[in-house]
Amino acid sequence: MRKFGLIGYPLSHSFSPAYFAEKFEREHIFDCFYDLYPIENISDFANLIISNPGLEGINVTIPYKKSVISFLNEKTEAVEKIGACNCIKIKNGSLTGYNTDVIGFEKSLSSKLTGSHTKALILGTGGSAAAVEYVLIKLGIHYSFVSRNSETGKRSLSYNELTKEILGQHKLIINTTPLGMFPNVDKCPGIPYEFLTTDHYLFDLVYNPVETLFLKKAAEMGAITKNGSDMLVIQAEESWKIWNEI
Ligand SMILES: NC(=O)c1ccc[n+]([C@@H]2O[C@H](COP(=O)([O-])OP(=O)(O)OC[C@H]3O[C@@H](n4cnc5c(N)ncnc54)[C@H](OP(=O)(O)O)[C@@H]3O)[C@@H](O)[C@H]2O)c1
């Protein structure tokens, strides 16, 4: 049996096990198994690898996307630059780290991107914001972060600074904060939604619920919207391609 799995803690609400179980059934893949490996401390990671010799691929989630990097033998440029790894391929005892958030976000964002989306606001400055930043640089889209702490050292604005003029200049707005995620569905980032137009494109990395309050308010102003569901599926499929060298 070929073994794959997810490390993180806690792992009670993970998307990946159900996704891979369905994929294996749908595609008649009978020699693979995807399991959860909830480890309470990253120091347990080395033991996990040693005690599971059949393990060929691992997804990594909160809180280990950064700390797992020190266990890697090789890593992609994206992992190096972003400082986060969410997918590992194990071959002949060697661990190579990838970041599939990057590929997932780029492909998902691009499906609705137009020529007017040349400047962006990234809401939040956490792990996924770094992956979003990496993609925007690659696509040549200028960006500013919006943070509760605008003195983070990155080029960032505070939520209070978001005027009609600023929103008029930034037609792409990406939510990388967890605001609005189930069960806190009545929360949303504090931007002035009344200044959004039909030229705006609001992307929410949150995927549950399907329509967050952030996207609902944007849609009410006629803006283009997209949630994080596609990104999640694309990432899972990218992991599969990496593990199988497709
Ligand atoms: N769809 C996908 O495939 C996908 C992939 C990755 C992540 N996600 C989702 O993206 C979200 C963020 O993940 P992450 O790993 O980047 O989390 P994270 O590292 O904790 O960062 C979230 C950032 O959001 C801001 N933030 C946190 N709480 C906030 C609050 N109460 N009000 C305003 N801002 C707040 C913070 O930035 P400041 O301190 O600068 O304000 C924080 O750094 C999660 O909901 C996650 O599920 C989805």
Image (spheres, rainbow, N blue to C red):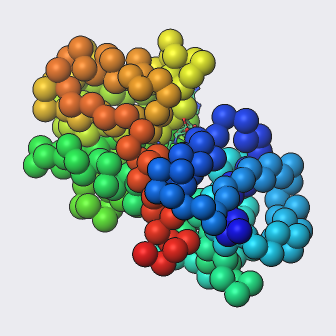
Determine whether, in the image, residue 39 is placed left or right of residue 5: right
Q: Nearer the viewer, residue 158 or 115?
A: 115
| Residue beneath the point at 29% across and 47% down | 109
Residue 129: x and y in percent read: 48, 48
Residue 36: x and y in percent read: 74, 50
Determine whether, in the image, residue 204 is placed left or right of residue 47: left
Residue 194: x and y in percent read: 25, 15
Q: Is residue 63 above or below residue 87?
A: above
Q: Nearer the viewer, residue 10 or 134?
A: 10
Q: Is residue 196 visible?
A: yes
Quarter of the render that holds ligand 1: top right
Determine whether, in the image, residue 52 is placed left or right of residue 11: right
Is the C terminus in the top left, top right, bottom left or bottom right quadrant? bottom left
Count of numbered circles in the view = 0
| Residue beneath the point at 61% across and 73% down | 89
Determine whether, in the image, residue 202 is placed left or right of residue 228: left
Q: Is residue 142 above or below residue 214?
A: below
| Residue beneath the point at 27% across and 31% down | 225
Is the N terminus in the top left, top right, bottom left or bottom right quadrant? bottom right
Q: Nearer the viewer, residue 114 or 33?
A: 33
Residue found at the far bottom of this picture: 92
Quarter of the image where one finds residue 222: top left
Q: Is residue 156 visible?
A: no
Residue 6: x and y in percent read: 68, 54
| Residue beneath the point at 50% across and 12% down | 186
